[in-house]
Image: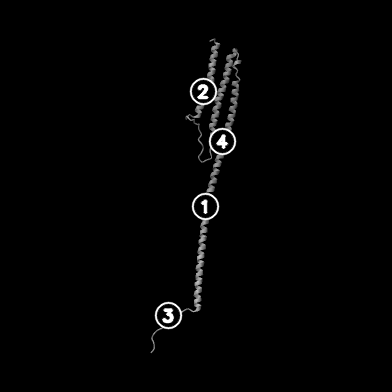
Amino acid sequence: MKSNKQPDLAFADAAPLDAAEQDAMVQARRERDTQMTDAAETLERLRLEQVEIEKKHADLAELGQKQDVYQRSKRDVLQRLDRALIALDKQSVDYAKSLEIIGETKQLFLQRRDAVHAIDESGWDRSDFEEALNRSFGIVDDADAVYARGMAKVEATSWAAGPATPLSSGGPAPVGPRVQSEGVPRHFLFWLKAGFAFTLPLAVIVLLLCYLLLFLNGY
């Protein structure tokens, strides 16, 4: 009696591979592992290259910012130096004029002082006493006027020159009359004292003239 049992196909499919097939599978696995290793190395190399590129990008950005700051600083310092040189040139001219005026005024003062010192009242002759007095009065009055004009000119020149302009960004220093501790402007005190100095010699001369006239008239 014949058996109707069919062969087991699953068992047939799971039949062991021969040596050639096993070698092919091993070779394929090795190639796949090698490709994965190469891919991983490539990714790592690309990552390092990206890090390097990002670093170069940051360095270039920083260099660009530094260049911008440099160019701006260079432009600013050149502008400040140019303005300062112009201001210094102007100050030099102003101060040179001031020194010239001061020198001229000094010479005028010396001449008038010597002229006033040269007056010798003891040598006046009684016969032309009034003429000598008038002549001396003219010398003193001229010295007084020269003093007033000279001081006013020197004072005006000093205010015109003004203080030097600083280089800082704070701007120029204010120009104007200096103030004393009591709050009175310096030029007011100056003219107050100058006015007193101007009138005092005239008052003394007038009193002397009155005394001499009284003496001559026999009082």
For disc 1, the neighbor class at 10 Å (few under 14, some 14 to 19, many from 20) is: few
> Distance of mark 3 from mark 2, alpha carbons?
141 Å
Name the kind of residue labelled 1 in the image: Glu
Name the kind of residue labelled 4 in the image: Gln
Local SS, label 4: helix
What is the quadrant of the N terminus in the image? bottom left
> Distance of mark 1 from mark 4, alpha carbons?
43 Å
N-term mark: 1 or 4: 1
Label 3 or label 1, whichever lies nearer to me, is 3
Residue 137 picture location, percent across and down: 57, 18
Local SS, label 2: helix
> Distance of mark 3 from mark 1, alpha carbons?
72 Å
Residue 180 picture location, percent across and down: 49, 30
Label 3 or label 4, whichever lies nearer to me, is 3
Label 3 or label 2, whichever lies nearer to me, is 3
N-term mark: 3 or 2: 3
Name the kind of residue labelled 2 in the image: Phe
Q: Which mark is residue 91?
A: 4
Local SS, label 1: helix
N-term mark: 4 or 2: 4
Look at mark 1 in the image and give the residue it sits on: 62
Residue 170 picture location, percent across and down: 50, 40
Name the kind of residue labelled 3 in the image: Phe
Q: Which mark is residue 196?
A: 2
N-term mark: 3 or 4: 3
Q: Which mark is residue 11?
A: 3
